[in-house]
Image (cartoon, helix red, strand yellow):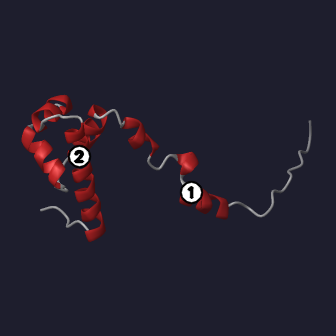
Amino acid sequence: MSKPVSPPCERAIKRLGAQISRARRRRRWSQRDLAEQMGASVSTVRRMESGDPGIALHHLVAALSAFGELAQLNALLDTPSDAIGLLMQDGALPERIRVRTSHGC
């Protein structure tokens, strides 16, 4: 049995499924067309579009690839643009740096 999905996560998954469905229909692709491009079954595409939280991540990545949107996925939580991570990192910076003197050569 899988862990229940929180309501905010469930809403996000449903919204993503609807967006995948819309992107597919805008391209005038059938669910079978998308499934073939993803290397998946039509039932997997249906489950993904309905927002089934049990869909494997590789199916989502395959759908994004079919739509030519892998760059969008690669930009998620990109280290240089992770504002929260950068703030936390900056907050842990030392107040001052001590200069070490070397003894010897």
94 lies left or right of 104:
left
Q: In this view, does 91 lie above or below 35?
A: below
C-alpha distance separating marks 1 and 2 = 30 Å
15 lies left or right of 93:
left
The amino acid sitting under disc 2 is: Arg
Q: In which quarter of the image is residue 51?
A: bottom left
Residue ID at (23%, 35%)? 27
* Quadrant location of the C terminus in the rendered image: top right
79 lies left or right of 49:
right
Residue ID at (17%, 49%)? 49
Residue 23, position as x, y percentages in the image = 26, 42
Q: Quadrant of residue 70?
A: top left
Residue ID at (26%, 57%)? 15
Identify the secondary structure beneath mark 1. helix
**What is the number of the mark on residue 22?**
2
Identify the secondary structure beneath mark 2. helix
Counting residues from the start of the chain, the first of labels 1 and 2 encountered is 2
Q: Nearer the viewer, mark 1 or mark 2?
A: 2
The amino acid sitting under disc 1 is: Ala
